[in-house]
Amino acid sequence: MLLLVPLPLFTYTIQTNRIVATYIILAILPTYAAYRSVTGSKHAVLLGLLSGGLVYLGFIAKGPVAFFTFAVPAIACLALKTRLSRAALSTILALVSFTVILFSVFYLFPDSRDF
């Protein structure tokens, strides 16, 4: 995402409000959290859970477009040659926290299922 910012087309779409600024933030933050959870941070579990929570917020802001963040640990594992188990753990933690938050919102606010 950060590599897209200097491109003229990307800056044009931000200036004309074709990309929601909230979604940009909610795409960069979970991506960074997922990346840090794979690269060997001592808070890998916490960052994996945080990534799932931020994916939920991105899902609320823009829809299923936010799901690309679930692929970040696998891509980081391939690019950085880290352990596959760490990438799998980060992805599973993000998916579980996303699912728990989503279904708890469905349970607490039944009208949210319709939207």
Image: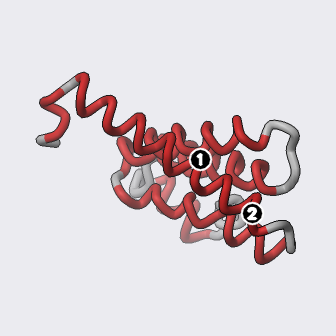
Residue at 50% across / 51% down in the picture?
Answer: 95
18 lies left or right of 55: left
The residue carrying mark 2 is: 85
As rendered, which of 63 and 40 lies closer to the eye?
40
The residue carrying mark 1 is: 93
Q: How is the image coloured?
A: secondary structure
* Mark 1, other Cα within 10 Å: few <14 / some 14–19 / many ≥20: many
* Mark 2, other Cα within 10 Å: few <14 / some 14–19 / many ≥20: few
Residue 78: image x %, image y %? Answer: 77, 77
Residue at 45% across / 39% down in the picture?
Answer: 57
**Identity, as a three-letter code, of the amino acid under mark 1:** Leu
Residue at 76% across / 49% down in the picture?
Answer: 37
> Please, what secondary structure does the residue beneath circle 2 have?
helix
Q: Is residue 4 above or below residue 97?
A: below
The residue lying furthest to the front in this view is: 85
As drawn, the label of residue 22 is none
Looking at the figure, which quarter contains the N terminus?
bottom right
86 lies left or right of 13: right
The residue lying furthest to the top in this view is: 108
